[in-house]
Image: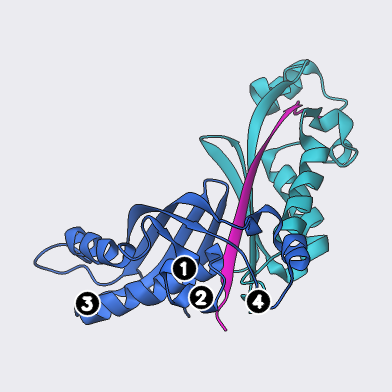
Chain colours: A cyan, B blue
Amino acid sequence: MDKVYMTKAFNFSAGHRLFIEGLSEEENMALFDKCANLRGHGHDYRVELMFNGEISPETGMIISRNEMDESVNDIKNDFDYKRIDLEIPYFKKYQSTVENITLYIWDKVYAKYQDRLSYVKVWENERSYFEYHREALR
Amino acid sequence: MSFKTLITKKVEFSASHRYWNPDWDDEKNKEIFGKNTSPLGHGHNFHLEVTVEGEIDGHTGMVINLFDLKDILNDVLENYDHKYLNEDLEVFKKIIPTPENIAKQLWDDIETELKKRKTDCTLYKVRLYETPDLYVDYWKS
């Protein structure tokens, strides 16, 4: 049996601010530039979740579309139209950078699918993204 | 350290399909496949990216002549374009034309053509977009 990969992509829009508590505004600005703007700023994020599996002879699918949609909705419930660093507890501890957002999403989806999850990619805008995967992919 | 030279061609085709397992009743098909099982089928503008691997020819500077690759893909896709996959293609009378199975079948069809035409390159990957938000990668290892 050959491995097949399926990727589901979706968007969410959210606000955030990068800063380290205890540092002055100037120090935060020096570290994070305009991402440290006191009042926050936002992005249209795009997420890609790649799953792997064998094609089931019964369904012709490697993954149930219903389950995949549930995972998408789960992530959207967390992030969509939220202020990430203030409204999601995890990001009170970790910077709400695209790197940490990607790892947060990886952990959440990995908990459900384990090694059937191959890859998570998060675009912060159309010109920058971060990706996380454990196996070499083509 | 090994190096690979890969080249990718993008093409499009439009087709309709339906997810339906004849061993199940209506209710079970609906439960598993949702709207994908709607009785008369539904369609997509599929986007296909085909990647081949080979050596760069010293004379032509090419891995494969892209016009040759385009010809191969046009020939293969003639069977798929503007078809109802479930009924117009024999293979999908036996397996459900999900994007997973379509990608796998496209791999086989393209590989057969590549070999038939004695190109010096091998198929590396096919990526089939059912929509911009859902795609399948397939390769044989």
Gap in Å between the C-alphas at discs 2 and 3? 33 Å
Do marks 4 and 2 both belong to one polypeptide chain?
A: no
Q: Amino acid at mark 1?
A: Glu
Depth check: give the residue in front, A66 or A105: A66
Nearer the camera: disc 4 or disc 2 = 2
**Three-letter amino acid code of the residue under disc 3:** Asp
Q: Which mark is residue B87?
A: 1
In the rendered structure, the residue with mark 2 lies on which chain? Answer: B
**Of the image marks 2 and 1, the number of the one nearer the N terminus:** 1
Chain letter of the residue carrying label 3: B
Give the residue pinned by disc 4: A56
The answer to whether marks 4 and 3 sit on the same chain is no
Magenta residues span A1-20
Measuring from the top left, give residue B19's x and y in whole percent. Answer: 61, 64
Quickly name the residue at label 2: B93
Say which chain tag 1 marks: B
Asked whether, in this view, residue A30 is left or right of residue B10, the answer is right
Which tag is nearer the camera, tag 3 or tag 1? 1
Q: What amino acid is at disc 2?
A: Lys
Residue B124, quarter of the rendered image: bottom left
Measured in 3D between alpha carbons, the distance from the residue under mark 3 to the one under mark 1, in whole angstroms, is 35 Å
The chain under label 4 reads: A
Tell me the SS state at disc 2: helix
The residue drawn where x is 41% and y is 67% is B88
**Marks 1 & 4, CB-CB < 8 Å contact:** no
- What residue is pinned by disc 3? B120
- A13 in magenta: yes
